[in-house]
Image: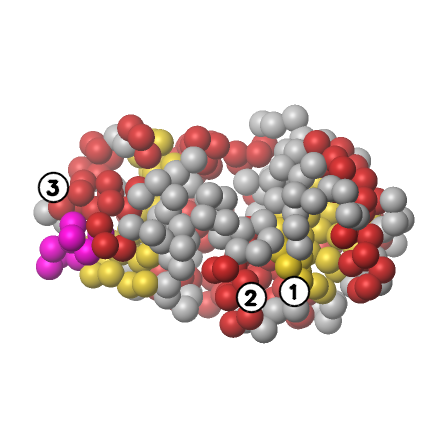
Amino acid sequence: MFGICLEASHQKGLGHLYRALNLTEFLNSVNKEYVVFINNDKTAVSILKEKSVNFEIVKLVDFESDWETELIKKYRLKTWINDRLDTDIRHSQNIVKNGIKLIAFDDAGSGAELADINFAGLPCIFNRDLKGKKVCKGIQYLVLNKKIDFFKRERNNIDNILVTLGGSDTYGVTLKVVNILKELNKKACVITGPSFQHKNELKELINDDFAILDTVPSLIEEFYKYDLAITGGGVTPFEANACGLPCIIVANELFETENGKYLDNLGSSIFAGYHENINTEIFTKELDIEKMSKIGLENIKTDGFENIYMEISIFLK
């Protein structure tokens, strides 16, 4: 049985949660049992309940009570997966002392040193000095929603623009982007996430050229309707590009700049910089949308889980 430990919050966003949901769907498909361990974030807990995911709320910052051992014994766990970016060595020690396997995703914390495998699928992690008994780097380990395979299409022109800056949009980048588009007299649909805290400001800002959708059931399905997306620099632009949807990327966090530059260099998206100093000229450029769409479809795949599971399966033999 797999234990999946993650953190979700307004500050850290919901990216780890959505990756965990993708992981649980994959584990269901290969008939593997799991349980999710998560901090007490109201939005994340509500989503897990809605999805009928087996989970327990834990105190991730508690390094004294050894809650990890209690849960390992309760669920008879054989493998523990951490998806928290910066796990503490004390947390990892509480896991490995029980003789089970420890897998990490994109972990640059001190706890990664004890991981049996540390998978790095995002370019923003590639250049870090990652620890772990084995480190697997590359976008072939990038975890994307398998639903993408049903909503791919090649774009040829820009008729419809989508704005989606993350489940929480901590810094209100959506407002900055809407202002830019208004000045350029461009129309767009804006999707806000479940932790978005700038709804009143957004409603005051928009005009008839903008539509607002709040917490859509499936972002992947929404992608299919649009020809260009303006996104943050996390996993979303990779998912969009895999669908054939080119992006203008604005980094919400400094570390996301590496992801934006990677996709810009690949040619499937264009990077407009960090949110504090957005390059507004990017929004006026003539884009070869057909070429960008083809590059995304050809280069961003959805087999990350298969590649990860293969590595884990070989290791567990």
User: Between residues 76 and 210, which one lies in front from this camera angle?
Assistant: 76
**Looking at the picture, does residue 133 appear above or below residue 245?**
above
Instruction: Identify the residue at image location x=21%, y=46%.
Output: 178
Residue 30 on the magenta span: no
- Residue wearing tag 1: 55
Label 1 near label 2: C-beta < 8 Å?
A: yes
Q: In percent of the image, x 85 and y 51: which residue is there? A: 100
Which amino acid is tagged 3?
Answer: Glu
Q: Label 3, on which residue?
A: 183
Q: Which residues are magenta?
A: 202-210
Residue 33 position within the rendered picture, expressed as x and y whole percent measured from the top left: 74, 68
Determine whether the residue tagged by mark 2 lies in a helix, strand or loop.
helix
Whether residue 307 is visible to the viewer of this picture, yes or no, is: no
Q: Residue at x 20, y 32 (%)?
A: 281
Residue 1, quarter of picture: bottom right
Query: Mark 2 highlights which residue?
Result: 48
Q: Is residue 208 magenta?
A: yes
